[in-house]
Each structure stands twice: as C-alpha cells, then as structure tokens.
Amino acid sequence: MDAKEFRQRGKEMVDYVADYIEGIEGRQVYPDVEPGYLRPLIPNTAPQEPETFEAIIKDVERIIMPGVTHWHSPYFFAYFPTASSYPAMLADMLCGAIGCIGFSWGSASEATLVALLAARTKAVRHLQATSPGLTQAMIMEKLVAYASDQAHSSVERAGLIGGVKLKAIPSDGKFVMRASALQEALERDKAEGLIPFFVVATLGTTSCCSFDNLLEVGPICHQESLWLHIDAAYAGSAFICPEFRPLLNGVEFADSFNFNPHKWLLVNFDCSAMWVKKRTDLTGAFKMDPTYLQHSHQDSGLITDYRHWQLPLGRRFRSLKMWFVFRLYGVKGLQAYIRKHVQLSHEFESLVQQDPRFEICAEVTLGLVCFRLRGSNKLNEALLEKINSARKIHLVPCHLRDQFVLRFAICSRTVESDHVRFAWEHIQGLATELLRA
Amino acid sequence: MDAKEFRQRGKEMVDYVADYIEGIEGRQVYPDVEPGYLRPLIPNTAPQEPETFEAIIKDVERIIMPGVTHWHSPYFFAYFPTASSYPAMLADMLCGAIGCIGFSWGSASEATLVALLAARTKAVRHLQATSPGLTQAMIMEKLVAYASDQAHSSVERAGLIGGVKLKAIPSDGKFVMRASALQEALERDKAEGLIPFFVVATLGTTSCCSFDNLLEVGPICHQESLWLHIDAAYAGSAFICPEFRPLLNGVEFADSFNFNPHKWLLVNFDCSAMWVKKRTDLTGAFKMDPTYLQHSHQDSGLITDYRHWQLPLGRRFRSLKMWFVFRLYGVKGLQAYIRKHVQLSHEFESLVQQDPRFEICAEVTLGLVCFRLRGSNKLNEALLEKINSARKIHLVPCHLRDQFVLRFAICSRTVESDHVRFAWEHIQGLATELLRA
C-alpha cells in the first residue's frame, strides 16, 4: 500500500469508523460467540501473497465484529467507562504516523520482567516444597539470574525490580555468551550457596547485534533446571526468512521467547510478542480473580486470559495491527522487506571497508553496522558529535568493551541505497574535517 | 465534534498523515530545539472553551513538529528500526474506534506497582543506611504494604510482584478505609517486628465507588513515614469539576497519585496519568543508563526522562491524545460530560428506589450505582445471568462483603436518559419473570 492508496483507504476507514460509532446502538452490546469461534474462520498461516484491503475490511464484519464487546455502546454499563472521542482518535492517527518512541524502543522489557517473575515464583515454590522451613525472603536472597554482559539494560532492571541478584556473564571476543563462561559462573555461585534460577540469552544484542550461543547455553539451562528466556527484540523479525532461521537453533531449550514486531516487522509501536513453553508457569505467578473480572469460561481451559500473563490488566487490541500487516504484505512482502534492510547494511559495511581510516567493529548479520574511526574514543566521540549536530542523519553510539563505537542501523521503511550512500559520504566528509583539524 | 465533522477532519488527517510520510525526507531528522522550548509555546492551563480543529492542526506544525525526532525518516539510523506501515495505521484507527479493553481496564496497575517498588527501594535504602548489617532480603521479609479490603486486585498483585506482604485493612460500613482500622493493623504489625512502608488509598473503588478517608489516613502515613499512594483510576476524572474536589481533601499527604484519563476523560485507551511528590524516589528505583540511551541533557535537570519512571522503556506519544481532547472539548466541555454521567447515575438510582423489590447497596457519588434484588445472592446471580444472556445491555457484578451485587456503571460517551430508562425497564421485566418462576 502506497501513500496514494492510503489516502483512499484511510478515508474509507474514517467513514467506517464514523459509521461504526453512529450505528453502535444497533449492534448487540455483548457477543454471543463461544470460545474458539474465531479459529475455523481464519487460516492457519499468514498469506504468502498480499491480499486486498477490500478482503480485509469485509472480514472485519464477518470475523472480528461478531466477537467484539462493544464497550462504547450506550447499552454498556459494565466495569467503568473507557474513554472514546473523535478528537482522541484523530490524535491517535497522528500519533501512529509520527510513531516516535519516547526515549527508547520497547516493551521487550516487560517480557523479560514477566519471565523473571514467573521463574522466581517457580523457584520459590519448588524450594519451599522441598524445604518447607524456607521463607520467600530467605530464598530470594540466594536467587541469581544471569545474562551476557551484552544484554539490554532492561534485563538488569528486571533483576532490580524483581529483587534478585543479576550477574553479567563475560561474552567472548565476538560478544557472544558461551557455555564455558556461564558454566564457570554457575559453579562459583553454587559453591557459595547461591541458587541460580534464570538465564536471559539475547539474539541480536542492542549494541552490536551479536547472538548468544543457544546450542551451548540451552543444554546447560536444561540440565541445571534454569528458566531460559530469549530476548530477540530486534532480530526476531528476521526469522521470517528461512536463511536466518539457523540463528534460532537451540530455541527448543527456551522457556520463554520474545520479539518486537513493532521494531522490524512493519507493525506500528507498540506490539511485542511473547511465547512461553508452559503457560501455567506465567499465569500461576500473577493470577488474581476478583468478582468483577470473573467470567463463565475462565475455568474451561478454552480461552486464554492474557490478564494473567502481563503486568497491566488492560491491553489494546494490538493483534488487529498484526493481522492487517500480515495480510496486506503477505509473508513474501515481509521477507522482502527484511532482506532489503539486510542488503542495505551490507552495502554500508562494504563502503566502510573501502575507507582505510575506518574499521568495522562487529560481524554484520542483520541490519546493524558497528564501525569507528581507527583511533581514540575521543576522536570517535567528536565524530559522532559532528554527525548529530549537523542533523542530516541521526546515529547513536555504544560501547563494545572499552571502545566507543558508532552504530549505523537500517531503520526507515523507506530507506534506499541512495540514503545509505548519502549518509556515508556525509560521514566521510565530517571525518575528513575532523582529522584535518 | 460530531460524526459529521469527524468524517471531514478524519479525511483531512489522513491526508496530513500521508503528506507527513511522503514529505518526511525533507524534514530535519533530529530536532535542534532546547529542553524547555515547548513551555512558552503552550498556555499554562487547558482552554475553558473548546477550540477549533484548524487551530490545533496549525499548532501541530508550529509547536509539536519542531520537537519531534522523525523516527521514520530515511536518514534515521539510530537505535533499531521502529515499525511503521499504512496497514498498521489503518488497523490502529479501527482499534481506536472499537476501543475495547482486553479483559479489563487499566494500567493504574502499573502505577501502583511502580509506586510500591519505589517505596520498597526507599525503605530498603533507609534501613540499610541506619543498620548497615541488614541485607535487602532481610528487610523485604519484614516489609508490609496496606490497602483497604475494597482496593482493586492490582494492588494485591503489586505486592506479589514486588515480593512484599500486602495486608487488607477492613473498611467500615460504608466501604471506607478509616484511621482506626489502619492504626490497629500498624500497631499489631510493628509489635510483631514487621516494617510498614506503603499504603494505597483508593478514591472511587471498583466495586462501589467508595472513597477512603484521606484526611484520616494521610496524617497517619505522614507520622509513620509510610509512602501513601492514591489510586483514583476511575474517580480522578471527576475532580475536573469543582463540586467534586472535596473528595480529594487530604491529597496533600500523598507521595504518589494516579488516575486514568482513558476511563472517564474522553481520551481513548490507553492513557494513565501519575504524579509523584518527589521524582527522585521513583527514578532512583529504576535508573539505568547504557551508552545507547545516554544523551547530552540527562544531567542538566532540564528534562524529565520518563524511562526512569516506568517499567517499559518505550512509550507511545499519548499526551497528543490528551492535548487534542482538552483543546477540542475545553474544560467546560469535559465538566459537562462528567456532570451528565453523574446525573444519569442518579436518575438510575431514583428509578431503583421507586421499585420496592430492589435496594441500593452503596452511596451513589459519581457514575456507578450498586443495586440488587432484596433476597438471596442466588436470586441476584440468576438476575444477572438473565440480563447478560439477553444481551440487550451488559453489566458486571461485585461482592460487597458477602452480598452479590449488580453494578450499573454509566459508561458510553453517547448514553442518554432514554438508554438508562430502557435498561431499567428491561431489568425490571427480567426481574418480574424471575420472581414469577
């Protein structure tokens, strides 16, 4: 869908929305479908080829609307109100278009925290079952979680919030968490009487897009009964392409897995997808059932109450965005999108390699290139400062060990080879100025 | 703004969005405004009278855009990509219109959790400073949080997640948390060597919209150095009307306060607003500063990094919705909206009172009426079952002490006296059938 079609479809959608709201009184306020009604109405897989907008909007009435509780019907007197107004909807359209991420990028953070809390609950219950004299606090004091020294800051934060120790495992020369370093930490901590319970492995680290070695780390977690959470926030989208699936090898050892379609799969922020191997491990940690939230299907096993899976009770209807995107792009369209970004990052990589003043600092696997001027951190800090104050392009840095490194991430839906080449020539020009001064 | 105007403005917005995205390459990717640039450009208060849409959209370019980092510019190579596509935007429009709340209603839950975690950190640090031998686990084992037995289930959940005890304070005959019951619990727990640290007071409880007595509870919290968090998720919106402000008396004792504009202030889900008295108490609990998130203003005190205030790192640009709503309704429009809902609930209350088969179960203050048939819980469960399976209107129940009670909440933006009367006659009819059977 291009801008021209969006102008048309957007206006149709505006009318659809206005019709929906004007006609809401005529709709049955509460659905009479049964759990599972949706399953036979939708295919088992996303379409390979893009579908038409007409097909989707027809399905909205046929498939989606019969299952909707119309919270804005004037016959809805349940719970408390949830707001709705035309101005807010207009603003949300604009908000979606701007699509900026306030201060950072994701709620993979929440997934990590939820997994850690579930693992904590599981560990506490297990230990209390075997040693009934132990209090929760006595156990929590000894629990230790682990992640690579390249893991995202949200992992450390999850440990802090969960009130447990988090230890950083030194990654290897390629910024990968390996068996030996993890095993060493586990042995040392167990010898000190601590209780390892949780490991976060990252596929596609934030700093340099390195991949922890699941085939090594997974079996250790399995053997030691540690909860293995995989944070694939960025890289997860790439696994839609068969050629990147080997990066997932070992995923079978994971207890939980998360990636953010709102990063790299064309679904606007926010939308973070999480899988767990055993759902009761999660729901057991958070379940609360006050009268006003109980419903007739809750013990049937037929439905999935996501309120037991997450921190907030409420959630937006985010799957609608995924459904539109999967259908309108098709798997092939999404694969082509990922491949184009990866190809552009390799193009940038080869431009950097042709200039002997620069070096590549980590292997380029997906859409991120880490590079720097050969020389001091100070020099590279000055280069970044020049780049960002010129305001033609925008980059952020990272530290790889003690090196200050520039990150060039392929981001925009509309970025082309021309933009990448422009960016590189611009960086080269600023580097020349800097080295001359 | 009515549906007719929305059709027009919505289509203008679609064009604005398409223009924005088509022209994004021509915009400077990273803003060069200084922290605080926005302050003098916007008024100190929301407008009393509604403004026009033209005025707002003009201000989007004048006021908002100069401060935006254009995450979807093809010159943006920072962090990782954040997704954007036309299909996702279309879906989000529909999602906004449906505005259903998956399984429940709010992220006041997150606010409570964040406040509890901040209070926990503060308590642990304070005690470790005075008794350096204490470990975090030794302290956490003794920490106790308190809330009324009428508090929302998310409060109990926050205690569970935070790994601290949460005790329910028995409310009085009007479902209000009072000084005596709280004081009693505190004395008993302190005598047992426990450490009280956190109290949640609710303004507008979920079950019956009762208001904890802040003028009694506040001074106790102050005297005992307990963090007082106020959960006004639903009722908070009503405080825009001067006549409801007395319900806030004692708010000066609060350390943190939260309400959900997405419930009752016409801002579509989700949008939850939280205040803290001392921001460093929150930010101190969560702060993480990896290189890729650092920026030049972070130690200046000039800007507020909300990533230190919340659990996820990222956040949607929700304030845009509030800004549109405040301006297009004006304070007066919002006050009129609240007052109308309150008036409708009193109308329903008086209808119930005129039928001697029914009773009102709690004082009606805002938009919620708790009522039941005089008789057994079983009878009322059967009535609710009849009401909800007829699917003409939708209600949820609650328990007040051991009574099963029906909650009639005025919810919809478009609900009128006619709908309320229809609902009442429908309920009466079903009650007649039930009592005859």
Image (cartoon, coloured by chain):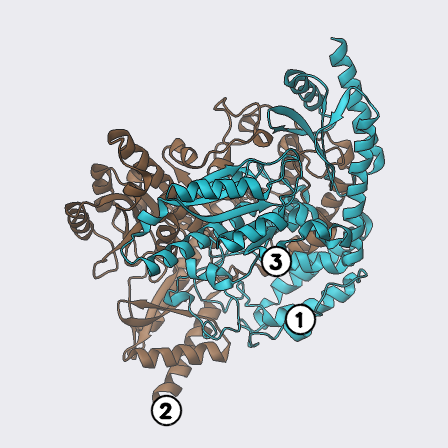
Chain colours: A brown, B cyan
- Under circle 2, the secondary element is loop
Q: Are discs 1 and 3 located on one and the same chain?
A: yes
The three-letter code of the residue at mark 1 reads Ile
Q: Chain of mark 3?
A: B
Q: Earlier in the sequence, mark 1 or mark 3?
A: 1
- Mark 3 neighbour class, 10 Å CA radius: few under 14, some 14 to 19, many 20 or more: few
Q: Nearer the viewer, residue B407 or B310?
A: B407
- Mark 1 neighbour class, 10 Å CA radius: few under 14, some 14 to 19, many 20 or more: some
Q: CA distance from mark 2 to mark 3?
A: 57 Å
Marks 1, 3: nearer the viewer: 3
Residue on which disc 1 sits: B63
Residue A145 picture location, percent across and down? 29, 48
Residue on which disc 2 sits: A437
- Under circle 1, the secondary element is helix
Q: Nearer the viewer, residue A359 or B294?
A: B294
At a point 37% along the width and 64% down the height, the residue shown is B290
